[in-house]
Amino acid sequence: MQVWTVANQKGGVGKTTSAVTLGGYAAQAGKRVLLVDLDAQGSMSCYFGLKPQSLRQSSAELMNHEGPISRELIKDIVVELPYEGLSLLPSSPSLITLERTSQNKRGFGLILGQVLSLLEEDFDLVLIDCPPALGVLMINALVASTRLIIPVQAEFLSLQGFARMQQTVDMVQHSLDTVIDRVVVPTMVDRRTQACQQTVRSLRNEFPVDLWPGHIPIDTKLRDASRLGVPANLYQPAAKGVQAYGALFRYLEQRISSQRSVSSEDELYASADNATKAYWAEAV
């Protein structure tokens, strides 16, 4: 089972849209997908029409559960979405309290990994939507992850949040003596503006190994899909922004199938399909 965390220590960069749309593409490809909402604001849960403040059980109950966690308890909280292959572990506002009360609990950073390990037979891919701040919830997500996806809005202030995110990942890697495969995704790109172009160039120059060579353009169809509670790939598959996420999903799948056997982005590009190459060629 693959576990992908979508995170950035800055809000409004497209984390939830990225997680839901990638999950939609994975489900369309025949994978059993679990979306995990770890943000107390519940953006992912709200995306699908749920009201986090009204839920009887949520991810908060699992994170704060006393004693052993059973597979049956988890499955009771998971919501089956009305889209084939997609399920959701919803959020609730009580996650805010959890951040404050659990910081000194020994082993708390490992809880989510333990929860997901009980679901390995049920799902092929887990996508975690994180809160936009460093805390025990983000640490849980990073510890449980096989991959980190970092959406970065193509504007100057987002680069500062991204720098903090990089420091967080380095800290987790050092403490766990491991390497988290990270992929930086430029989002909300408007190629007509110099600011966007300069931001993407800065990312390319400073993080050439981690940066996805494509980008997600501004596209109102992504916002419309969120308003309707439909994964964007099912709502408007021909929209430019939606197709860009399709190219990103294929890129991520290629990295999995190659098991990082390629030694450079050039080799990965050479083995990619034509649709993915087309979006790479349009990168700023």
Image: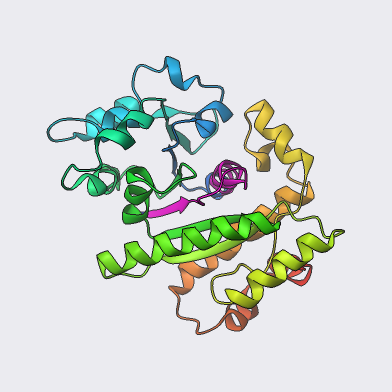
Q: Give the camera-side residue of 188 and 221.
A: 188
The C terminus: image quadrant: bottom right
Q: Is residue 7 magenta?
A: yes
Residue at the outermost left position: 67
Residue 252 in the image: x percent, y percent? 54, 63
For image coordinates 64% across by 69% down, the residue present is: 203
Q: Is residue 233 magenta?
A: no
For image coordinates 45% across by 44% down, the residue present is: 130
Magenta extent? 2-25
For image coordinates 30% across by 35% down, the residue present is: 100
Q: Is residue 109 positioned above or below 69 on the image?
A: below
Q: Is residue 158 positioned above or below 251 on the image?
A: above
Q: Give the camera-side residue of 284 and 48.
A: 284
Q: Give the camera-side residue of 142 and 229.
A: 142
For image coordinates 46% across by 58% down, the residue present is: 148
Asked which colour scheme the image uses, the reply is rainbow
Q: Give the camera-side residue of 247 and 192.
A: 192
The N terminus: image quadrant: bottom left
| Drawn side of residue 198 relative to residue 58, left or right | right
Residue 231 in the image: x percent, y percent? 62, 37
Q: Quadrant of residue 251?
A: bottom right
| Drawn side of residue 273 relative to residue 24, left or right | right
